Amino acid sequence: MKRPGIGKLTNLLEKNRIEALTDGIYAIVLTLSVLMIGTGLYSGSVESSAFYPALNEAIPQLFNYALSFFLLSIFWIVHHRQMNSISHVDSIYIWLNMVSLFFITLVPFTTNLNSDFSEYPLAVAVYAANIMVISLTYTISWCYATRGHRLVAADIPDAAIRNGIRRGLLTSVVSLVVIGAAYFIASEWATSFYILIFVIGFFIKNPEMDIYSK
């Protein structure tokens, strides 16, 4: 892979630092939310009459944690695939990633908010908006890096770039569906629509056109 000339190195940076920072933040965020599950079960001695209600309360919390865990896993994979395709980064790409990391660190908070107040559409909307912004920032990062093959190899097919954008926008569109479902169907079950990401993603997958499948 051809490296940029010496004259261009002023604004170009090695990508390993952003990779290390991102991996560290994901490792922390993927763990934090689980600490909020079933807090009523950890309050010391629990009477038998209170155990089952507390356990029942923990079930939707566990679902929301699992949902956030796998959504964050998707985002981590997207970032990993992007970095594999990018030869170097510049300050704009780094700051786009920092914005995404900021919203990633908010996921434990919005997950807990959704778990505790899922009967309120606004709580679900805040969670879905959090997920949507993360998806959009990664899509924007990919668009920036691939425009004119700015930060990627020249031999990456245009079809793969376009398919990567479509897959990146999928989570954003589903997040809008979740917000609509929270207000017009049932806020308690609105986040179940995130399953569409896995279903639709399976059918649109094309290894020859999808840079994220390599």
Image (tube, rainbow, N blue to C red):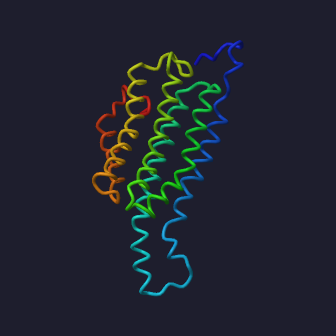
Q: Position of residue 132 (x, y in %)?
A: 44, 42
Q: Residue at x 41, y 19 (%)?
A: 158
Residue 116 quadrant:
bottom left
Q: Nearer the viewer, residue 203 or 110?
A: 110
Q: Is residue 121 left or right of residue 130?
A: left
- Residue 180, relative to residue 119: is it above or below? above
Q: Position of residue 176 (x, y in %)?
A: 36, 42
Q: Quadrant of the C terminus?
A: top left
Q: Nearer the viewer, residue 149 or 127?
A: 127
- Residue 112, relative to residue 40: is it above or below? above
- Residue 82, relative to residue 71: is it above or below? above
Q: Residue at x 47, y 35 (%)?
A: 136
Q: Quadrant of the N terminus?
A: top right
Q: Position of residue 83 (x, y in %)?
A: 55, 32
Q: Nearer the viewer, residue 50 or 185?
A: 185
Q: Residue at x 48, y 59 (%)?
A: 113
Q: Is residue 48 left or right of residue 29?
A: left
Q: Position of residue 192 (x, y in %)?
A: 33, 53
Q: Residue at x 38, y 21 (%)?
A: 159
How many labels were placed on the picture? 0
